Amino acid sequence: MQAQLFQSAPINTSLRLDPRTKLLMMFILSVIMINGDIRGKAVYIRLVLAVIPFILLLFSGRIKASLFYAALYAAVWFAEAFLVYTTSGAANILIVMLAGMVGRFIPCAVMGYYLMTTTRVSEFVAAMEQIHMPRAIIIPLSVMFRFFPTIAEESRAINDAMRMRGIGINSLSKNPVALFEYRLIPLLMSIVKIGGELSAAALTRGLGGPVKRTNICKIGFGVWDFCMAAVMIAALAAYVLIQRGTL
Amino acid sequence: MITLSNVSFSYEQGEQEGCLRDVSLTIQAGEVILLCGESGCGKTTLTRLINGLIPHYYEDGKEISQLPLYETAKLVGSVFQNPRSQFFNVDTTSELAFGAENLGYPVTEIEQRVAQTISEFQIEPLMERNIFRLSGGEKQKIACASVAVCTPPVFVLDEPTSNLDAAAIDEIRRLIGIWKSQGKTVVVAEHRLHFLRDLADRAVYMRQGRIERIFSVQELKALSQPQLEQMGLRPLWLENLTINRDPVHGTGGSLDLPRLFFSHDHRETPTLDVKDLNVPAGAVIAVIGHNGAGKSTFARCLCGLEKRAKGALQFHASVMNAKQRLKNCYMVMQDVNHQLFTESVLDEVLLSMAEKDETKAEKILESLDLSHLKTLHPMSLSGGQKQRVAIAAAIASEREIIILDEPTSGLDLRHMREVAQNLRRLAKMGKTLFVITHDPELILSCCTHLIQFENGKVVLNEALDARGAEKMLHYFLDAGKKRAEYTEETI
């Protein structure tokens, strides 16, 4: 029933990473995956990187999700390696497009999912403070994360109300704009209201004072952080070298 | 000591509601003060004055307080009405530390304070949890605990129990008791007076922005029920309540649920397991039970929102599955903002009609005193008016079964009576109503039948006559005590 975004409970995983490492991984993975060629040596780097989100998901106990991802990526890989060369015409275009899109974005999306579901907001804030991100960025970001589950909650309630009143697919054909409006207006209204109350509550609890905020959240680098960072940086270096034609 | 001398305040839009007119009040350190009075009398404004939100957040007044808000934060801890919108983190442990972190206390000290608060408030089972998955009562406990971590000398609570059940109210009473025993100053603005009658030192009765009278606790307790009613206050003793409605004339017929079953994924015990429930058609049925006992799930399953619920409803010789129930039942939600979609009150009613009939829609609005508002945007109305619009839409949809989810949470006596009157109107039209509520006064002023849930099952199903009323009150009086004992055992 509940949105899983941003974890609360301690994450039972043998492979615990610092949020900074996760961010670095997210960055490099996205750069290489989205840019990546489907031909040449760079293909191997992409293959290695695509395996990483799978491993992370597996170790954080999201076995179903990891298997689903593995199957999906294997299918894309198969399509890119074989189907693209053996089909022609519209089918070929479709396969190239689909495989290209899915192959480029799914690993990044899965990495993002991993980042979101295994990091607490306070861990994230602590990490941001460590890398000296200005507060003007950290506070809005952390509020945003706090709001995802709220939006999900409100939107579910509105969805129920619409179903009950019989506003749905049937009225979509008659007036698609109205359907959009019905969904959005109450959502915006309640989010604005919650936002106002939330900021009042935060102010009464001393947010925004001139003192340096402390954070009880303990973050730090471990063996896995170094391993993962090493793999990622090596991959990035290799990728750059390949692109420049020196490898 | 808190001193307010000759304070006047008004909100920017020139609203009359919530203004303060020449208020002077001195609160001694260690006092527990109850602020009471009708909605809009200025209770909330007074609490905002004390916790510093006025003039900082709700900007208008002149320099009432020179102190910046983050300084006030060290002196005053605030708990608000809505449990959903006062936590800043997703997990409970970070939330407890949040205030102390903002004030820049060293990490070891924060950990100590958090640990101490956890043991004082006995909230170990709530730690390391996702706040979004806690019940309203649990959220409110976390809110109290997280302001307590900063150990401010003053606590301000603005209608903390509006959304809570009897057991959770009792928990809030316990927490305020802890603060009182620690010598803290506590200011509580509340409509529900009964849980505070043995805690408060003085009660400040406000009316239209002025302090009308200050009662000592003895004077407060000496007030008779008619006197309280005249002041627009809720009862001090639930024990004394009696049935306050016309006798019932049944419409005949009944509504049968041979089985209604629903289970969330991955759970062994079903969330809802109703067997052979049989209630009179045309009745106003109060649905009571603890938070988490299955009332809301029952409502969702009954009106067909849970597709996976198993079971059918037999009503007027028709058997309805979930899909048909969705077309025949209407739920007035606790947060009515979720179900108002259009740009005017009239459109809202028309939206519910299969065949748009403006004269009929106007008639419905007329019957609910909404005619003069028909061109206004529903979102611009007051809470009570919004609820009436939702009820109007329910009537327009011509559905026979209407479910109301806590229609009187956070309402004062006058507004509660308005709701009760609306419910009686619906009953007169022959609708069958299910009213999920934690409000014994509302039940006594309009309900004719009672069902009680426990662990997803119906444990009580009977007519709300004198005997039924006694059982109902017994439940509300006992609910707090029993639950409190239970939690102590589990800890």
Image (cartoon, rainbow, N blue to C red):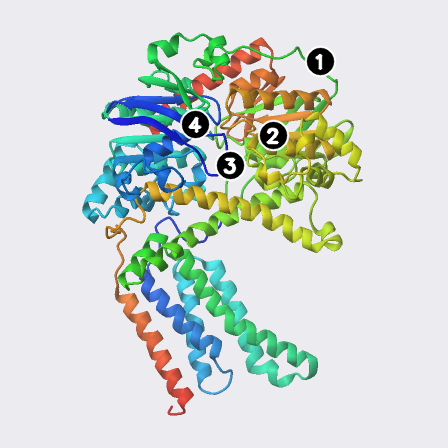
Tell me the quarter of the image containing the N terminus of chain B: top left
Q: Nearer the viewer, residue B96 or B75?
A: B75
Q: Nearer the viewer, residue B365 or B184?
A: B365
Q: Earlier in the sequence, mark 2 or mark 1?
A: 1
- Distance from Cα at disc 2 to Cα at disc 4: 29 Å
Marks 2 and 4, the one that precedes in the sequence: 4
Q: Is residue A2 visible?
A: no
Q: Which residue is mark 4?
A: B42
The amino acid type, in three-letter code, at marker 4 is Gly
Q: Secondary structure at mark 4?
A: loop
Task: Write down the chain letter for disc 1.
Answer: B
Specify few, some or many for label 3: CA neighbours under 10 Å numbering under 14, 14-19, or 20 or more. few
Question: Which amino acid, by three-letter code, is at mark 2?
Answer: Leu
Q: Are marks 3 and 1 on the same chain?
A: yes
- 10 Å crowding of disc 4: few (<14), some (14-19), many (20+): many
Q: Which of pointers 3 and 2 indicates the residue nearer the eye?
A: 2
Chain holding disc 3: B
Q: Nearer the viewer, residue B269 or B132?
A: B132
Q: CA distance from mark 4 to mark 3?
A: 47 Å
Q: Is residue B391 above or below residue A89?
A: above
Residue behind mark 3: B269
The residue identified by callout 2 is: B404
